[in-house]
Amino acid sequence: MKPTKAKTKPRYTAADLADVESPPLTEEQLDRMRPAREVMPEILELVRRFRGKQKAPTKDLISLRLDHDVVDHFRARGKGWQARINATLRKAVGL
């Protein structure tokens, strides 16, 4: 009795191969790929600048609708406008 070959799914479908906008990468292209940290370290540095998830959040993330003129007033004073809104609200409620 001959051993049967296990049927495997094709690596690419006909639709993949017909997509000229995004053709599948060749083995040669895959072999030439390098980690992003070697190719574009400056872009990775930009990504690392953003804070991750807080371990013990002290604030709640909410969605709040405000009038355009109110938002414009706080944004016009530059960075930190959301913190200034928070401080104004704390003062208004007596905290």
Image (cartoon, helix red, strand yellow):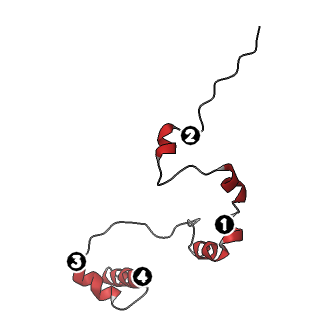
Label 4 belongs to which residue?
83
Residue shown at 25%/83% (left/top)? 70
Closer to the camera in the image, 31 or 86: 31
Q: Quadrant of residue 69?
A: bottom left
Q: Earlier in the sequence, mark 3 or mark 2?
A: 2
Badge 3: few (under 14), some or many (20 or more) residues near its Cα, within 10 Å? few
Dot 1 or dot 4, earlier in sequence: 1
Q: Residue at x 60, y 38 (%)?
A: 11
Q: Which residue does the image show at 65% across and 72% down from the upper left? A: 40
Of tags 1 and 4, which is closer to the observer? 1
Residue positioned most to the top: 1
- Residue that badge 2 annotates: 12
Indicate the position of residue 74 as horizontal and vertical percent values: 33, 86
Query: Which residue is label 1 attached to?
Result: 36
Q: Position of residue 88 (x, y in %)?
A: 34, 84
Residue type pointed to by label 3: Asp
- Quadrant including the C terminus: bottom left
Q: Which quadrant holds the N terminus? A: top right
Counting every numbered tag in the picture gives: 4
- Amino acid type at mark 1: Ala
Residue 18's disc number:
none
Q: CA distance from mark 3 to mark 2?
A: 52 Å
> Which mark sits nearer the N-terminus, 4 or 2?
2
Q: Please, what secondary structure does the residue beneath circle 3 have?
A: loop
Instruction: Pick whichever of labels 3 and 1 is earlier in the sequence.
Output: 1
Say what amino acid the circle numbered 4 marks: Ala
Chain-order first, disc 1 or disc 2: 2
Would you call the spot at circle 4 few (<14 residues within 10 Å), some (14-19), or many (20 or more)?
Answer: few
Residue under circle 3? 67
